[in-house]
Amino acid sequence: MNDNPRLHASAADTPLPSLLAFEADLAASTESSAGVESLLATMRKGWIQLDGEILRRLRLSRYMSQQDLANDCWHRGIQVSIATIKRAECGHPVRFRIARELARCFEVPVEHLVRLSA
């Protein structure tokens, strides 16, 4: 019998959708093909631009400073630094892994954090 815990994962343990699935959903749900193409090109390189205003509002809705958010992430086992939070809120691209981690921290889908206009 195989005791690999990955083989016995429940539906709640399933990972977030893959980058390719996200690309397909994004392309199907948006109308600005030029903006989508540049966004997808950036995503293929492993980077994605998040909507800094949405991130800021989510953080402030929980009455947290950027440092509080970084500390909360650390205590929850989510690896996001204060510098990364600052960059994301300023609109600088972040690694796709960071987008997933921030979405996990705020308990929202990654799609909710993505900036659609290029």
Image (cartoon, grey):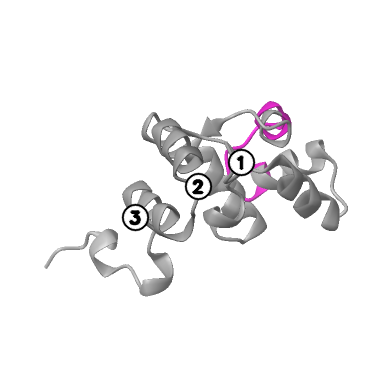
Q: Quadrant of residue 5?
A: bottom left
* Rendered image: mark on residue 32: 2
Quadrant into which the C terminus falls: top right
Question: Which secondary structure, mark 1?
Answer: loop
From which residue to which does the magenta span run? 74-86
Where residue 73 sits: x, y (%)? 66, 45
Is residue 82 shown left or right of residue 61?
left
> Which-is-in-front pick, marks 1 and 2?
2
Is residue 30 shown left or right of residue 83?
left
Q: Mark 1 belongs to which amino acid?
A: Leu
Q: CA distance from mark 2 to mark 3?
A: 19 Å
Instruction: Check disc 3 and report the residue beneath it.
Output: 21
Q: CA distance from mark 1 to mark 2?
A: 17 Å
Q: Mark 3 belongs to which amino acid?
A: Ala
Question: Which secondary structure, mark 2?
Answer: loop
Can residue 62 be spotted in the picture?
A: no
Q: Residues within 10 Å of mark 1 (few under 14, many from 20)?
A: many
Query: Magenta span has 11?
Result: no
Foreground pick, 1 / 84: 84
* Rendered image: mark on residue 50: 1
Residue at image location 48% in from the left, 40% down from the top: 97
Q: CA distance from mark 3 to mark 1?
A: 18 Å
Can residue 70 be spotted in the picture?
A: yes
Residue at image location 63% in from the left, 51% down from the top: 76
Choose the circle earlier in sequence order: 1 or 2. 2
Where residue 106 sits: x, y (%)? 66, 56
Q: Residues within 10 Å of mark 2 (few under 14, many from 20)?
A: few
Residue at image location 46% in from the left, 43% down from the top: 36
Q: Quadrant of residue 61?
A: bottom right
Choose the circle earlier in sequence order: 2 or 3. 3
> Which-is-in-front pick, marks 2 and 3?
2
| Residue 41 position (above or below residue 15) | above
